Amino acid sequence: MRYLIVSDMHGNSDAFAAVLDQTAGEDFDVTLVLGDLVGYGASPNKVIEQVQGLTRTVFVVRGNHDKVVAGIDSGEHFNQAARAAAEWTTAALTADNLKYVLELPQGPVAVHAGLAICHGSPLDEDAYVFSEVDAFEIFSHHKVPVTFFGHTHVPSIFSIHDNSIQVLALRGDGSLRLEPGGRYLINPGSIGQPRDRNPRAAYMTYDEAERTVHWFRIEYPIEMAQARIIQAGLPSLLAERLALGI
Ligand SMILES: [Fe+2]
């Protein structure tokens, strides 16, 4: 089985289109969507339609921004720009797309017995997994061998072998062969709002037979996503940060 893994598109259809174009000719069986389809960016309807238009089998979970936009969470803990964007997105979505966001499943979702997806942590969909301490807590309770997660917008791989944790901060393009007997928490990074000071859209692929994860960064027309944000009247900070990858 071959997987395409996408996360945190955040209403940035220009970045997501670049990833879909780049991978269109490749032979994937399943697409894994790790949440935060909307929020921040100015093309939330388009991103939902891009997800709905995926021709492969799709597994999807909701993100924290999806929850606030849908009214499941209040967003009181969001900063001002994030809250303004969530309110704008709620108003901008069509009724059908708002219903779609409202009904996105809560993670973790099992793809099969050995593979799961979630937005934040498999123990708490809203929790951030940044450190080996966060990962150790998860590995202590969550026994699925391979879990893909999003939320931090930082491409990374946490693994555990014989009670020893390893953390890889991923830069640029690369690949890793997963070791039998290890367990893995894998974050592809963000398509629509990277935060590792690299503005290129981040995504991953996973070849289950080869046990190999590949990670990629690709350019997209950032200025188009920025122009849409400014034109929509969203906070200009949200446009500026796209060029900086923060
Ligand atoms: Fe996010």
Image (spheres, grey):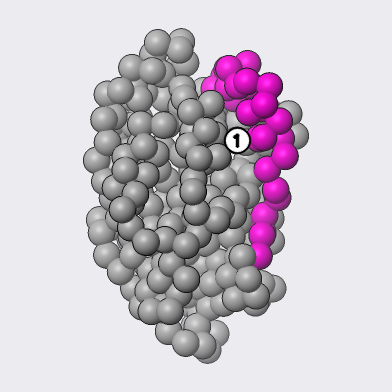
Closest to the observer: 44 or 244? 44
Amino acid type, label 1: His
Residue at the right extreme?
72
Looking at the figure, which quarter contains the C terminus? Answer: top left
Q: Judge whether 33 appears above or below 87 on screen.
A: below
Residue at point 33%, 65% (across, down): 214
Q: Is residue 181 left or right of residue 4?
A: right
Q: Is mark 1 within 8 Å of ligand 1?
A: yes
Looking at the image, is 138 positioned above or below residue 43? Answer: below
Q: Position of residue 95 (x, y in %)?
A: 68, 21
Residue 90: x, y in percent? 63, 21
Check if residue 15 falls in the magenta segment. Answer: no
Residue 89 position in % (x across, y down): 58, 22
| Residue 156 visible in the shown view | no
Q: Which residues are magenta?
A: 84-110
Element under label 1? helix
Residue located beneath label 1 in the image: 65
The vertical placement of 92 against 134, above or below, is above
In which quadrant of the rendered view does residue 99 lie?
top right
